[in-house]
Amino acid sequence: MNPNTTHPLTRVVAAVTATSVLGLAPLVAAATPAHAGGAAPTLRSGGDDDPPGDDHGGRSGDDGTDDNGGSGGDDDRVINTGSCSAGARWKVKVKTDDGRLEVEGEVDTNRAGQTWAWSLRHNGSVSARGSSTTTARSGSFEVERKIVDLAGTDRVVFRATYAGQTCRGVVNF
């Protein structure tokens, strides 16, 4: 080997090291040649090893920690769930859709006829707001919007209020 040439793996390691500081490591990993490190890595978990009926995708919890979604899925989504201030439950799902982000926010109270005020914030700016009424069959409502997929991490906050009760879910995508 010529001492003036850099080994391909050395270039990849240097690129991953340099870009991981900027949060771009998944992009470099996707561009890494197969000969440099074996098979291409899975960049996001899809929840393929979750039990039937588990709709948590690759992540769950208020902090976005992995719910054992494992690797190997090609589903590009993050779902967080949690409790509201007075017993209701919330769910926020973010996934890619034709170059945009599809955001779903849901509140489940098990009580029909409640009209909740809600808002969706994207990186601190209000993307949508409105009101929705829980339906008779499930006692829940769902809001779905498509937003711009900005460069870097997108922070999506779904907030809903009713009669002094607050639900607030966050997804960092």
Image: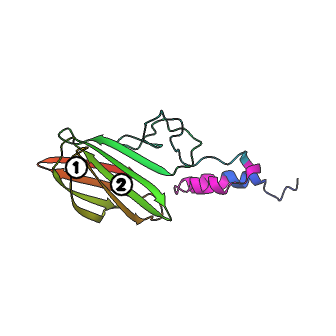
- Disc number at residue 13? none
> Residue 104 has which mark?
2
Residue 31 inside the magenta-drawn segment? yes
Q: Can residue 71 be seen from the camera position used here?
A: yes
Q: What stretch is highlighted in magenta?
A: 14-36
Q: Report the front residue among 66 and 81.
A: 81
- Measure how far apart labels 2 and 1 are at the Cα level: 17 Å
Question: Which residue: 52% across, 55% down?
Answer: 23
> Taking 151 as reference, is 114 left or right?
left
Amino acid type assigned to the residue bearing label 2 in the image = Glu
Secondary-structure class at tag 2:
strand
Which residue is under mark 1?
Answer: 135
User: SS of the residue at dot 1?
Assistant: loop
The location of residue 83, given as percent across then percent down, is 26, 40
Looking at this view, name the residue that lies furthest to the left. Answer: 163
> Which percent across, then down, holds residue 35?
77, 50
The residue at 22%/49% (across/down) is: 135
